[in-house]
């Protein structure tokens, strides 16, 4: 599978689906803020690291795939579940990169130039994310 951009998906997505993503993201962010206020920034930050729109996007991916199959006359829901699972797999890979970003900021921020720390954290995120993607694509992971 190659990485590509599909702008036609923007036309297929309804306004209420964007609203659901916005509300899920806002609710998770607000919950993280309340947890940070009550338990401290470390616990709140852990919850803020959760991909805020993932719950909404996973259900929407599944719904769109199921609708495409029904339109073609196929009544199976397996394809929708597989697409949502693939979306979850990608989100998990992305979270590993974000964890590296957070770790670099956490270790380097006190007493250093914030611009340089942000640059280093971004480089760590990018490098780890690319490595994870390449590792997944390697023969080691697909040795069937």
Image: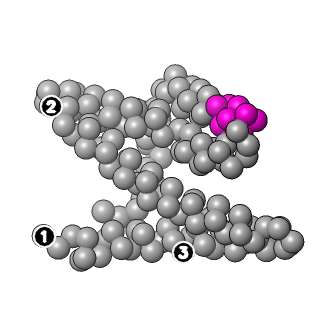
**In the rendering, at what x and y percent does residue 5 appear?**
45, 55
Q: Residue at x 84, y 73 (%)?
A: 112
Q: Which mark is residue 45?
A: none
Q: Which residue is the site of mark 2?
A: 76
Residue 72 in view: no
Query: Where, quadrant-wise, is the N terminus in this rendering?
Result: bottom left
Q: Main secondary structure of the magenta part?
A: helix
Whether residue 63 is in magenta: the answer is no
Query: Where, quadrant-wise, is the C terminus in this rendering?
Result: bottom left
Q: Nearer the viewer, mark 2 or mark 1?
A: 1
User: How crowded is the residue under tag 1: few (<14 C-alpha within 10 Å), some, or many (20+)?
Assistant: few
Mark positioned earlier in the residue sequence (3 or 1): 3
The residue stretch that appears in magenta: 29-38
Residue contact between numbered discs 3 and 1, judged by CB atoms under 8 Å: no
User: How crowded is the residue under tag 2: few (<14 C-alpha within 10 Å), some, or many (20+)?
Assistant: few
User: How crowded is the residue under tag 3: few (<14 C-alpha within 10 Å), some, or many (20+)?
Assistant: some
Pick the residue in front: 104 or 88.
104
Q: How far is the residue under mark 3 from the one under mark 1?
A: 27 Å
Q: Residue at x 50, y 61 (%)?
A: 96
Q: Quadrant of residue 110?
A: bottom right
Pick the residue in front: 10 or 24.
24
Give the SS element for disc 2. loop
Q: Residue at x 61, y 48 (%)?
A: 46
Give the mark count: 3
Left or right: residue 43 compared with residue 93: right
Give the SS element for disc 1. loop
Q: Which residue is the site of mark 1?
A: 144
Pick the residue in front: 46 or 6.
46
**In the rendering, at what x and y percent does residue 67 appear?**
28, 28
Q: Which residue is the site of mark 3?
A: 127
């Amino acid at each position: 599978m190659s990485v590509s951009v599909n702008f036609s998906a923007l036309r297929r997505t309804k306004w209420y689906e964007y609203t659901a993503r916005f509300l899920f993201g806002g609710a998770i962010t607000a919950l993280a803020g309340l947890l940070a206020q009550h338990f401290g920034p470390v616990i709140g930050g852990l919850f803020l690291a959760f991909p805020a729109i993932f719950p909404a996007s996973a259900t929407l991916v599944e719904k769109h795939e199921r609708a495409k199959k029904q339109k073609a006359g196929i009544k199976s829901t397996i394809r929708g579940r597989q697409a949502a699972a693939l979306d979850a797999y990608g989100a998990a890979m992305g979270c590993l990169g974000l964890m590296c970003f957070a770790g670099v900021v956490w270790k380097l921020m006190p007493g250093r130039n914030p611009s340089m720390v942000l640059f280093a954290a971004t480089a760590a995120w990018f490098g780890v994310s690319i490595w994870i993607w390449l590792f997944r694509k390697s023969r080691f992971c697909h040795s069937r």
